Image (tube, helix red, strand yellow):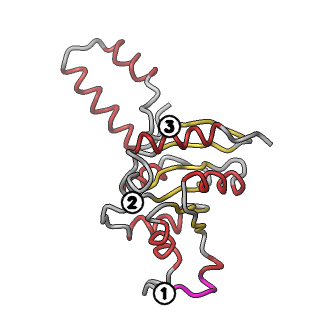
Amino acid sequence: QLRGEHNIWNVLAATVLADSAGIPVHAIRHAIQTFRGVEHRLEIVRTLNGVMWVNDSIATSPERALAAIDSFDRPIILLAGGRDKDMVWETWALRVKREVKQVIAFGDLAEKIEQMLCSNGNGLTSLNQLKRCKVERVATLAEAVALASKLATAPDVVLLSPGGTSFDAFNDFAQRGNVFKELVGQLQAD
């Protein structure tokens, strides 16, 4: 089953195009009912100990990461990071502060993410703010997965929706997503 309002719009657009191309309604219906999504785009990797692990490595902008967050009604542990493309992050930071249970920041963007989510608005971060801040900073995706596996409890979603590109550590988003899936596959049940 596809997640997210953006996918509803995609299905509607595809339905209109298919209908206008003369594709029979039963074939359109079958395609909608059997399509499971695309790799690295809100891809459910596994559910382990009641925690859903989701690969959205394609989300290389803050807006795409927010669309992924909007797709779940469960507590989210967000794995965010990579390399910045000089995007606007303010809306992302405001929403993540309100809507996400925990952020694990990794890669080149980790420090910037921590500053955005933990500062008092003028770029300064007090010790008190750091204590309340829901960001953990790590160097690598492997460290992020390991930490998430310790922090996550049912019914959390651990969502790799980085917001940044993969080029700080990987060749492309697909390699990053595949490494994420391998790491998640190695996790052991309690």
User: Relative to 186, is 100 above or below?
Assistant: below
- Give the amino acid type for the residue marked by disc 3 in the picture: Glu
Label 2 to label 1: alpha-carbon separation: 22 Å
Disc 3 element: strand
Residue at 62% x, 86% y is 127
- Helix, strand or loop: magenta stretch: helix
Residue at 50% x, 81% y is 119
Disc 2 element: loop
Report crowding for label 2: few under 14, some 14 to 19, many 20 or more residues within 10 A (C-alpha). some
Label 2 to label 3: alpha-carbon separation: 22 Å
User: Relative to 56, is 45 above or below?
Assistant: above
To which residue does mark 2 refer?
A: 83
Circle nearer the N terminus (2, 3) = 3
Whether residue 111 is in magenta: the answer is no
Which label was assigned to residue 124? 1
**x, y percent for residue 9:** 33, 39
**x, y percent for residue 23:** 25, 14
User: Relative to 117, is 157 above or below?
Assistant: above
Contact flag, marks 2 and 1 (Cβ < 8 Å):
no
- Give the amino acid type for the residue marked by disc 2 in the picture: Arg
Taking the image as shown, residue 160 lies to the left or right of residue 166, namely right
Magenta residues span: 125-129
Front label number (2 vs 1)? 2
